Amino acid sequence: MTAPLPESTSFAAAPALSAASPAAGAAGGSANGATTVAIDLGDRSYDILIGAGLFDQASSWAGLPRAAVALIVTNDTVAPLYLERLKRQLAPLYGRVEAVVLPDGEQHKRWESLDVVIDHLLAGAADRKTVLFALGGGVIGDLAGFAAAIYMRGVPFVQVPTTLLAQVDSSVGGKTAINHPRGKNMVGAFYQPMRVVADLDTVDTLPDRELSAGLAEVIKYGPIADPAFLDWIEANLDALLARDKAALAHAVRRSCEIKAWVVGQDEREAGLRAILNFGHTFGHAIETGLGYGEWLHGEGVGCGMVLASELSARLGLMPASFVTRMTRLIERARLPVTAPRLGIDRYLDLMRVDKKNEGGEIRFVVIEGLGKAGMRGAPDALVAEVIEAHSERHAGASTPTEPPQR
Ligand SMILES: NC(=O)c1ccc[n+]([C@@H]2O[C@H](COP(=O)([O-])OP(=O)(O)OC[C@H]3O[C@@H](n4cnc5c(N)ncnc54)[C@H](O)[C@@H]3O)[C@@H](O)[C@H]2O)c1
Ligand SMILES: [Zn+2]
């Protein structure tokens, strides 16, 4: 019933990591392996453009719907880095190019910020042809996408993701949302962009922690869909951490291909799309349990994948060596692999409110064989064992032989 995952076109040689790798954006390198991944959703189909230097190429912005007004939504961290460059490219194409600059942070992915965007549009009499550009990470993409979905019942929008996480995950697939004080992403819509422009040069300015958080989502695609990609990530992780453009281009492209394949079969998450949440049930519990902002989403997902791998092993679906393999890779990506001590009951409570649950049972994405994921329930006692097996030692306990944990 499900279409086969398309083969990647170039797994061939792992890109060499040149020690003297020039800072990206060096003149002349603009067309550095630029590629396009097509998202096939009938009349909502669109392209993801991936490459270094895409910002400054007119072709990245050509062919979008014409309009009197373009509105760029961004935040006060990204604006000083990239806003003027984007404005310069869009100026010849639109009558007016405007910008809303929101405060940075997940805590601003909320009604009040949405209202600022909608109010700006109405105050400027922006019509229903207005094109919105989401310039930033997943927070901006989710919020601006939702604004585009509801302004005048929907205006065209373009994702311009500037974090690795947004390039490999949140900008693709059409999920848009804001948070509610009672829950993350609880108010939103499925609404596809007209295009995604992922300029890999933007990764150069990302803080190290954000780079690693993005790598968690890259790693996730291997075990759920593509064993060869998992091998490739293991072989190229150092190049990815060094922000090597050829390595990043491959990682972003393959991640988007896999996401496109999943979303193409299950746009509205009736089933298959849930496999993209590998590691997320545990990860969300950690994020929420520690309080937003303590661990990044990708950090929760990294540790969550260790726990979900352990669960897969304890359910008899995978060998113990798989858990070791995943733990090693996640640790190498500079992500946490040891779960914080929230208390088992707290973990279970937090996981029971997950959107994916049905009828009170906690459902987990598990690996059923390399490259194949499924959804399973598990007894609380087993889940408790899994968490215990990967929890940090008691605070204050003297464990001199343990390496320091983050
Ligand atoms: N819609 C989806 O399918 C989907 C999927 C995964 C995650 N998400 C959402 O995405 C959000 C997380 O996204 P994120 O990890 O991109 O976080 P983010 O948007 O908060 O960005 C992380 C940080 O990096 C900064 N930043 C962005 N680009 C930068 C650049 N090029 N250089 C320097 N700093 C830069 C941001 O200002 C922010 O401080 C969450 O809200 C999550 O719910 C959505
Ligand atoms: Zn995620």
Image: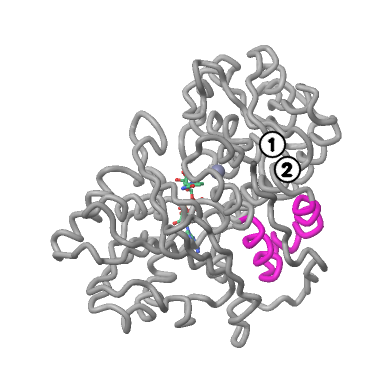
- Find residue 223 and name its label: 2
What is the count of numbered marks?
2
What amino acid does circle 2 point to?
Pro
Task: Report the front residue among 368 and 140.
Answer: 368
Q: Position of residue 123 (x, y in %)?
A: 13, 61
Q: Quadrant of ligand 2?
A: top right
Q: Are marks 2 and 1 in contact (CB under 8 Å)?
A: yes
Residue 345 falls in image quadrant = top right
Dot 1 falls on a residue whose secondary structure is strand
The chosen color scheme is one colour
Task: Report the front residue among 284 and 229.
Answer: 229
Q: Position of residue 21 (x, y in %)?
A: 72, 76
Relative to residue 306, is residue 15 depicted above or below? Answer: below
Q: Is mark 1 within 8 Å of ligand 2?
A: no
Q: Position of residue 46 (x, y in %)?
A: 47, 63
Write the start and end of the magenta stretch as one range.
228-255
Q: Is residue 147 visible?
A: yes
Task: Report the front residue among 175 and 272.
Answer: 272
Residue 94 falls in image quadrant = bottom left
Whether residue 253 is in magenta: the answer is yes
Q: CA distance from mark 2 to mark 1?
A: 8 Å
Between marks 2 and 1 in the image, the one whose residue lies nearer the viewer: 1
Which residue lies under the disc numbered 1? 373
Outermost residue, bottom side: 28
Q: Is residue 334 visible?
A: no
